């Protein structure tokens, strides 16, 4: 229906344009109309999840939790790690699950998403607390009969660990429906600059970011510690933030979080990572350590490959943002399944299945078509085509992050990183080594310390 309407509009505009040319010369008004036809997609529309309809209303009240908080919350399994700060749109089609969340909205508005382990089949024991901020009108008002289905938006707020983790492996599908579990909120460690204890406070007025004088002062500070300056520079927040900012600038993302913890979560959410790497970063408590490992991952040049047959689907340089939240966002479909989507300007080795449809489109103004891997015919995502000729971009792909996996292409991989599996296996070992190094920097005694 919408396709027919847009086609009629285009034909009408073409007829008007031909008439103007026959009359001998377009006016400035016609030029202005043609300029207005060229329109860049408003990426704030995708972040608003307008496809969920206009029936959602704000949920009042907020929950304030601290590290170490323990409580019982309803949890449900998810197919990947969701980091704090991400928006979580959900459509619950199960009546019991909808009733559980409806009661949670009346209470503290909290529920949890459980992360699977590296294989994606077992419970890892980790998860993220989410707080509902918009829900269907009337939900949570009164004690009447619960809704048969429920649409709502939530925001991931805190990482948690299940208090009672069973010794035996538990399949993730055991939590395919809401279950109440006791969880403990994990701490977010903010150690600050490792060189701060060695600083001379009288010279703080001379310190300016990224200046030769600041580098000289940092060298003086490091001289009274057991470690050379380059070791401290590895965990320098300003240096790491600049590397991350330069990387995402190529994707037209400029507004990065300023605070270290928020930046580490935002970066992890927007990097093209394997499920194993995402879980390894999720389990880290220290923000500087998480940022350090993200900088290392940025240095690896990778391609996105089909998870089933490993054929190349897209390259990292083709990733771009179609949402104000970043290059990655969560979207739900009509069946209630939430997809983790990364948007790319082009894709290779794909073929389309079915007819284009604008129904429940995550990007208003675009029609979606199922995209399959051309080699094994596995589902990898969707192609989105603009319904108006003036809308830019005219075409892009949304790839499911659990259907494609990053693989090093060899240009940025270190020695011995032959393919995508080796870097993923080494990340946990690198995290352990970096954690020991950072602890040594922060808690190392000064040479001039007097034991008396």
Image (cartoon, grey):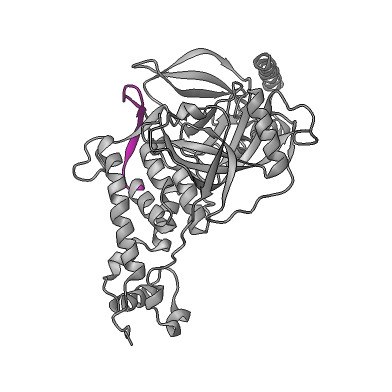
In the picture shown, does residue 113 fall above or below 18? Answer: below
Q: 106 or 258, which lies in front?
A: 106
Q: Can you name the residue that lies furthest to the bottom here?
A: 452
Dividing the picture into quadrants, the one containing residue 401 is top left
What are the residue bounds of the magenta stretch? 298-312
Q: Position of residue 80 (x, y in %)?
A: 46, 35
Q: Position of residue 385 (x, y in %)?
A: 55, 23
Confirm whether residue 151 shows in the render: no
The N terminus - image quarter: top right
Quadrant in which the C terminus is drawn: bottom left
Q: Quadrant of residue 380?
A: top left
Look at the image and say whether residue 299 sits in the magenta stretch: yes
Please say whether residue 361 is one of the residues in the magenta stretch: no
Q: Position of residue 60 (x, y in %)?
A: 74, 46
Q: Residue at x 41, y 51 (%)?
A: 284
Left or right of 6 in this view: 128 = left
The structure residue drawn at horizontal position 68% and vertical position 17%, both measured from the top left corner, is 2
- Taking depth in this image into account, of 42 and 288 the one nearest to the observer is 288
């Amino acid at each position: 229906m919408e396709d027919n309407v847009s086609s009629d509009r285009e034909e009408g505009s073409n007829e008007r344009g031909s008439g103007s040319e026959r009359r001998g010369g377009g006016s400035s008004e016609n030029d202005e109309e043609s300029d207005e036809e060229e329109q860049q997609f408003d990426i704030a529309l995708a972040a608003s999840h307008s496809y969920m309809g206009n029936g959602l209303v704000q949920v009042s009240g907020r929950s304030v939790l601290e590290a170490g908080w323990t409580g019982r919350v309803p949890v449900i399994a998810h197919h990947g790690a969701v980091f704090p700060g991400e928006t979580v749109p959900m459509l619950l089609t199960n009546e019991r699950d909808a009733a559980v969340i409806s009661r949670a909205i009346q209470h503290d508005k909290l529920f949890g998403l459980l992360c699977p382990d590296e294989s994606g089949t077992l419970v890892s024991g980790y998860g993220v607390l989410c707080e509902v901020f918009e829900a269907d009108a009337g939900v949570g008002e009164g004690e009447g009969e619960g809704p048969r289905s429920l649409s709502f938006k939530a925001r991931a707020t805190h990482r948690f660990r299940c208090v009672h983790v069973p010794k035996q492996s538990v399949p993730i599908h055991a939590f395919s429906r809401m279950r109440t579990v006791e969880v403990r909120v994990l701490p977010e460690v903010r150690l600050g600059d490792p060189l701060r204890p060695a600083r001379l406070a009288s010279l703080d007025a001379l310190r300016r970011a990224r200046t030769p004088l600041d580098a000289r002062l940092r060298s003086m500070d490091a001289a009274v510690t057991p470690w050379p300056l380059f070791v401290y520079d590895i965990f320098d927040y300003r240096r790491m933030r600049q590397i991350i900012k330069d990387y995402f600038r190529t994707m037209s993302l400029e507004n990065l979080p300023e605070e270290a913890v928020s930046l580490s979560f935002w970066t992890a959410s927007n990097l093209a990572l394997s499920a194993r790497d995402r879980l390894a970063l999720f389990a880290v408590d220290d923000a500087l350590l998480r940022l350090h490992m993200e900088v290392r991952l940025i240095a690896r040049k990778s391609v996105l490959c089909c998870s089933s047959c490993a054929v190349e689907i897209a390259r990292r340089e083709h990733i771009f943002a179609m949402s104000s939240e970043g290059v990655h966002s969560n979207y739900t479909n009509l069946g209630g399944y939430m997809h983790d989507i990364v948007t790319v300007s082009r894709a290779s080795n794909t073929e389309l299945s079915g007819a284009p449809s604008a129904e429940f489109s995550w990007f208003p103004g675009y029609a979606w078509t199922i995209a399959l891997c051309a080699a094994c015919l596995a589902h990898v995502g969707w192609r989105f085509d603009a319904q108006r000729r003036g809308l830019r971009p005219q075409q892009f792909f949304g790839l499911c992050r659990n259907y494609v996996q990053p693989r090093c292409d060899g240009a940025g991989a270190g020695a011995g990183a032959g393919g995508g599996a080796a870097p993923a296996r080494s990340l946990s070992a690198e995290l352990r080594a970096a954690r020991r190094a950072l602890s040594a920097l922060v808690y190392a005694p000064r040479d001039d310390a007097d034991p008396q």
